[in-house]
Image: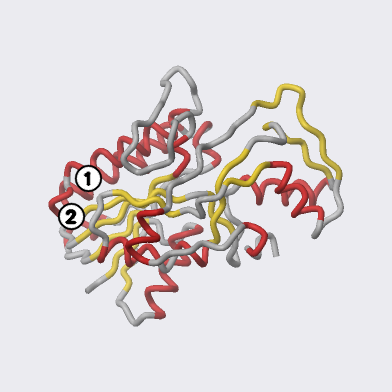
Amino acid sequence: MRQTILGASGYIGSQLKAHLESLGHEVYCPARGDEAVFLQDLGQVYYCVGMTADFRSKPLQTIDAHISLLARVLKEARFRGLLYLSTTRVYLGAGHGGEDGALQVNPNQADDLYNLSKLTGESLCRAFADRQVRVARLSNVLGGSRRSPSFVDSLLDDIRSKGKIVLRSTLDSAKDYIALDDVVPLLPRIAQEGNHAIYNVASGVNVSNAALLEMLAQRYRFTYEVDPAASRVVFPEIDVSRIEQAFGARARPLAEIAFGE
């Protein structure tokens, strides 16, 4: 079956392209704005289009990436299945990190635009569930040959350029991290074998900022300080039982991920 990647030039899309090609698939990677997408059979679609750290300064582009283009693809394109890449960031403020749990957003918070747009994209996908449209909620992905748009890589940038980190979240703030090499092989399996509408793709283990600094200190020399206005940001542990049971997935702990190299 033909494989189509929307957003193939991005961090995850580019690695997914290489993986699918290594398996012998024909991989179609249209450029942004290419109207030919709507004139041919796309086969299995991977929707990797998205905004990352710059969503705050580009709210309209964020809506276009996470919702508007997706809506048009769902409405007009011909495909056999579609996998929409979402984020475990949607669990911030939730009581549990399971795929079926209730989530919390606040439109009065500017940062919640990202979660609102991703969740709207997810809801659109659920409306087309009869067409094998699924969602993968990705944790904070690290590793690979390209710089990732992650919190960790932003810290590494500061270490290399300044030799100093200024944390804007407290030392006990914690989130989940997963290796790019653990993510990419799972995406085609979720897309083509999954029986659920939504899958968490995460390690299932939270790592605090304090523990992360300890790991970085084993590789680099730097100083750090915590901004006096730093907020405490703790995500619930992400439930990974669904990918474990369906695909036997076991993500490596952060200490074993080769990031920043």
Q: Nearer the viewer, residue 70 or 172?
A: 172
Q: Quadrant of residue 124?
A: top left
The residue tagged with tag 1: helix, strand or loop? helix
Check disc 1 and report the residue beneath it.
72
Category of crowding for the residue at label 2, using alpha-carbon neighbours closer than 10 angstroms: few (below 14), some (14–19), many (at least 20): some
Which residue sits at x=23%, y=60%? 36
The answer for how far apart the CA atoms under marks 2 and 1 are is: 7 Å
Q: Earlier in the sequence, mark 2 or mark 1?
A: 1
Check disc 2 and report the residue beneath it.
77
Q: Nearer the viewer, residue 144 or 197?
A: 197
The residue tagged with tag 2: helix, strand or loop? loop
Q: Nearer the viewer, residue 92 or 23?
A: 92
Category of crowding for the residue at label 1, using alpha-carbon neighbours closer than 10 angstroms: few (below 14), some (14–19), many (at least 20): few
Q: Compared to 168, does 10 lie above or below?
A: below
Task: Left or right? Give the position of 191 relative to 130.
Answer: right
Instruction: Indicate the amino acid at tag 2.
Output: Ala
Q: Compared to 223, does 44 lie above or below?
A: below
Residue 48, x across and y down, in percent? 39, 54
Residue 1, x across and y down, in percent? 22, 74
Q: Residue furthest left?
A: 130
**Quadrant of image for the C terminus:** bottom right
Q: Residue furthest top?
A: 108
Instruction: Indicate the amino acid at tag 1.
Output: Arg
